[in-house]
Amino acid sequence: MKRIGVFTSGGDSPGMNAAIRAVVRTATYHGLEVYGIMRGFSGMIKGEFVRLDSASVSNTVQKGGTILKSARSQKFMTKEGRQQAFDQLVNNGIEGLVAIGGNGTFTGAMIFEEEFGIPTVGAPGTIDNDLYGTDYTIGYDTAVNTALDCIDKIRDTADSHDRCFFVEVMGRDSGYIAIPCAIGGGAEIVMIPETQMSVDVVVDTLQTGWKRSKTSFIVIVAEGEEEGNATNVAARVKEAIPQLDTRVTVIGHIQRGGSPTAADRLLGSQIGIAAVEGLMNGMRNVMAGIVDKKLVYTPFTDTINKKKLINQSFMRMVEILSV
Ligand code: F6P
C-alpha cells in the first residue's frame, strides 16, 4: 500500500483534528502518502482530494471541528454513488481508507468494501459515545465537559429564582452524555432512552424534593428519551405541579464545538496511529478503539449491531446523590 485517504463523516466531534493529524503523521512516518477527502463520502464521490503532508496538519491538534469538513451523503447510499466514489479513488491511486465517524460512516464503509474491496479502518469519532468496541469515542469527553459548563450556569439562575430546569442534552439514541451531566451537574433526575422512567416518576421525585425543602431542580433529559423531548416532559410536569416554575434549555450544537480536552486529543492521536498501522497490517472493516486501556480492533459488524450498555449503577448514583 502506497497511498491512503482519510475522511471525516457524520456529525463532527472535538478531537477529530487530532485523529486526522495522527493519521497524516503516522502515514508519513511509515513512508505512505496521504490524501484528505473533503466532506466525507460526498467529497469522495466528487473527487475532492487534497494531498496532506506533515506541515498540513500543523497547528490543528487543539482545534474543534474537522479541517476535512463533514457531511452525510445520500448519494453514497446508492450503488451508482459508490461506483463514482470507487472510480475517483482508483483514478487517484488511493488504496486504503481511514474513516473517522460513527455507525453511519462504518455502515457505508463496510458496504463499499464488500462491493469494491477498498480496505477501511475506522476511528470512533462522535460525541455520543454510543459505539461498541471502545470505552470512549473521540469528542465525548469534550462534549460532556461543555454540557456540564452550561449546566453549572443554569444551576446558578435556577437557584436564584427557585426554578426547575429541564435541560436537554445530545446523544442520539443513547444516554451516555446525559449520565455524567446528571452526576457531575448535581441533577435531581436523569431521563435516558435506556431506562423507562415515566413522567409520573419525575413528578413524584420533584414533589418529594419539594417536601424536603428543595427549591430548585435540574432534570437532565437525553434527546432520545422515549417519553418525549425536554419541552414535552416539562409541559407534562407543569400540568401535574402547576406551582412549579419551569424552564427548558436545549444545549444543542454547542456540545459539538470547542477545543478538545486533553483526553480527546490523546484518544484521537492514539486511534489515528492505530488506524494507519492497522491498515498497513492488512486489517479491513474494523474500528480501532480502546477497551480497558488496551487497543482493540472490532469488526464493523459488531460496532454497528452490538449495543454498548450503560452501567445501571449510574442511575442509582443519581438517585442517591439527589436525596
Ligand atoms: O451524532 C452526533 C449528534 O450531535 C447527535 O448527538 C445528534 O442527535 C445529531 O448528531 C445531530 O445531528 P445534526 O448536526 O445533523 O443536527
Image (cartoon, helix red, strand yellow):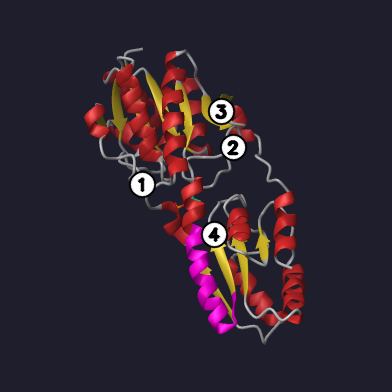
Which one is earlier in the sequence, the residue at label 1 or at label 2?
1
* Majority SS type along the magenta span: helix
Tell me, yes or no, whether the two marked residues, 1 and 2, touch with CB atoms within 8 Å.
no
Q: Is residue 155 left or right of residue 25?
A: right
Count of number-bearing discs: 4
Which one is earlier in the sequence, the residue at label 3 or at label 1?
1
Residue 94 drawn above or below residue 271? above
| Quarter of the image that includes the C terminus | bottom right
The question of residue 284 being in magenta is answered with: no
Near mark 4 (Cα within 10 A), the count class, few <14, some 14-19 or many ≥20, is many
Between the residue at mark 2 and the residue at mark 4, the CA separation in whole angstroms equals: 20 Å
Tell me, yes or no, whether the two marked residues, 2 and 3, touch with CB atoms within 8 Å.
no
Between the residue at mark 4 and the residue at mark 3, the CA separation in whole angstroms equals: 27 Å
Which residue matches tag 2? 135
Residue 189 drawn above or below residue 207? above
Residue range corresponding to the magenta coloring: 147-164
Q: Secondary structure at mark 3?
A: helix
Q: Is residue 224 visible?
A: no
Which one is earlier in the sequence, the residue at label 2 or at label 4?
2
Q: Is residue 115 left or right of residue 91?
A: right
Task: State the residue at coordinates (30%, 20%).
Answer: 28
The image shows residue 212 at horizontal and vertical percentages of 75, 79
Label 3 beta carbon within 8 A of ligand 1: no
Which residue matches tag 1? 65
Q: Is residue 243 visible?
A: yes
Which residue matches tag 4? 169
Near mark 2 (Cα within 10 A), the count class, few <14, some 14-19 or many ≥20, is some
The image shows residue 307 at horizontal and vertical percentages of 66, 39
Which one is earlier in the sequence, the residue at label 2 or at label 3?
2
The image shows residue 108 at horizontal and vertical percentages of 48, 32
Which residue matches tag 3? 300
